[in-house]
Image (cartoon, rainbow, N blue to C red):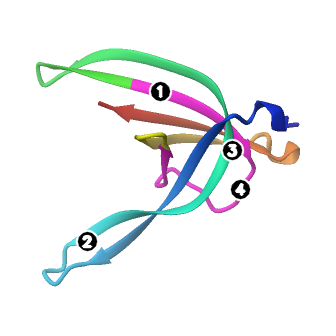
């Protein structure tokens, strides 16, 4: 069961929408679908080399109240950062919670 006292972080859930331009190209934009409270479970960071330049990757794991309709195409707004959803753990559905695994590449 999720405890309301642990939900201290504010997240903006951003749903993707696509549109076609006059030239037929597809453009994906993200619109705020909901703003929710979350518990920050874990933050990790690592550096990796790609195409001979160093990149930093920050991974965040959040617990939120269970919501239907989300998938890994969604984005998460966390403060001034935008995170990609890499995995959604719905094993806590019966308890009314879900775990969001997110990644930001800087």
How far apart are the two marked residues, 3 and 1, measured between alpha carbons?
18 Å
Q: Quadrant of the C terminus?
A: top left
Disc 3 target residue: 37
Of badges 4 and 3, nearer the viewer stands: 3
Numbered label attached to residue 31: none
Q: Could you tell which of marks 4 and 2 lies nearer the N-terminus?
A: 2
Vertical placement of residue 84 versus 59, above or below: below
Query: Is residue 65 inside the magenta stretch?
Result: yes
Q: Earlier in the sequence, mark 4 or mark 3?
A: 3
Mark 2 lies on residue: 26
Tag 1 residue: 59
**Tag 3 near tag 2, CB within 8 Å:** no
Q: Is residue 84 magenta?
A: no
Residue at 53%, 29% (x, y): give it: 60
Indicate whether 13 appears above or below 46: below
Comparing marks 3 and 2, which lies closer to the viewer? 3
Tell whether label 2 touches label 4 (CB within 8 Å). no
Q: Are marks 4 and 3 in contact (CB under 8 Å)?
A: no
Query: The magenta stretch spans which residues?
Result: 58-77
Counting from the top left corner in percent of width and height, residue 57 is at 36, 24
Task: Name above or below for residue 47 compared with residue 51.
Answer: above
Q: Is residue 30 above or below residue 54?
A: below
């Amino acid at each position: 069961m999720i405890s309301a006292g642990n939900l201290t972080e504010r997240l903006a859930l951003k749903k993707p929408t696509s549109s076609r331009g006059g030239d037929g190209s597809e453009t994906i934009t993200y619109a705020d679908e909901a703003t929710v409270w979350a518990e920050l479970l874990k933050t990790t960071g690592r550096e990796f080399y790609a195409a001979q330049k160093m990149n930093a990757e920050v991974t965040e794991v959040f617990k939120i109240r269970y919501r239907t309709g989300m998938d890994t195409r969604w984005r998460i707004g966390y403060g001034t950062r935008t995170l990609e959803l890499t995995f959604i753990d719905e094993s806590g559905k019966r308890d009314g919670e879900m775990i969001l695994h997110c990644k930001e590449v800087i």
